[in-house]
Amino acid sequence: MLKYLVNLYVGSKVFEGGLDKIKAEGNLGEDFESEFNVNKDQMKIAGYFEAVGSIFLFLSFLGKTFTRIGTFLINTVLGVAILKHLKAGHGYEGSKKALGLFGLNTLSFLSTFRK
């Protein structure tokens, strides 16, 4: 039961960010481009990965495969986000949220291999 709650938590946090990236309203796209050297199209692709991965996490109660696919999609984006934050000079503080979600997501992925 706890792993499904963790999946819902991670999925909800990432889903919000994914939708923001897909919409790319306001200065968000320009901020990403100047801060992280990521153009609007790349940002939208990352948003789609996050949104689809979150949906798989929401459906994780249906089977381990949903959890594995969702964590793979989300951790791909989170891993790049962590690296981009570190390259931008934000350090641990700038990447703390992504690191926390990455860790929870990885634990969820590893739990799918237990019997």
Image: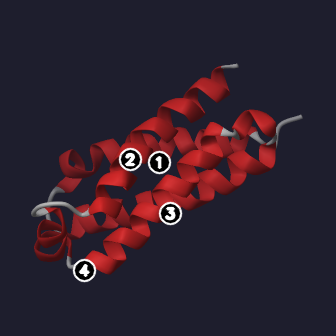
Q: Which residue is mark 4?
A: 39
Q: Which residue is mark 2?
A: 99
Look at the picture and state if 65 lies above or below 85: above
**51 with respect to 4 (left or right):** left
Considering depth in this image, is 94 or 37 the residue closer to the camera?
37
Q: Amino acid at mark 3?
A: Phe
- Expressed as whole percent of the image width and height from the top left, the position of residue 92 reads 23, 49
Cα gap from disc 2 to disc 3, whole angstroms: 17 Å
Q: Earlier in the sequence, mark 4 or mark 2?
A: 4
Q: Amino acid at mark 2?
A: Leu
Which quadrant of the structure image shows residue 8? top right
Q: Amino acid at mark 1?
A: Phe
Cα gap from disc 3 to disc 1, whole angstroms: 14 Å
- Expressed as whole percent of the image width and height from the top left, the position of residue 113 reads 81, 44
Q: Could you tell me if the residues under marks 1 and 2 are in contact, i.e. CB atoms within 8 Å?
A: yes
Identified at 61% across, 59% down, the residue is: 72
How busy is the neighbourhood of tag 4: few (under 14 within 10 Å), some, or many (20 plus)? some
Look at the picture and state if 86 lies above or below 94: below
Which quadrant of the structure image shows residue 84? bottom left
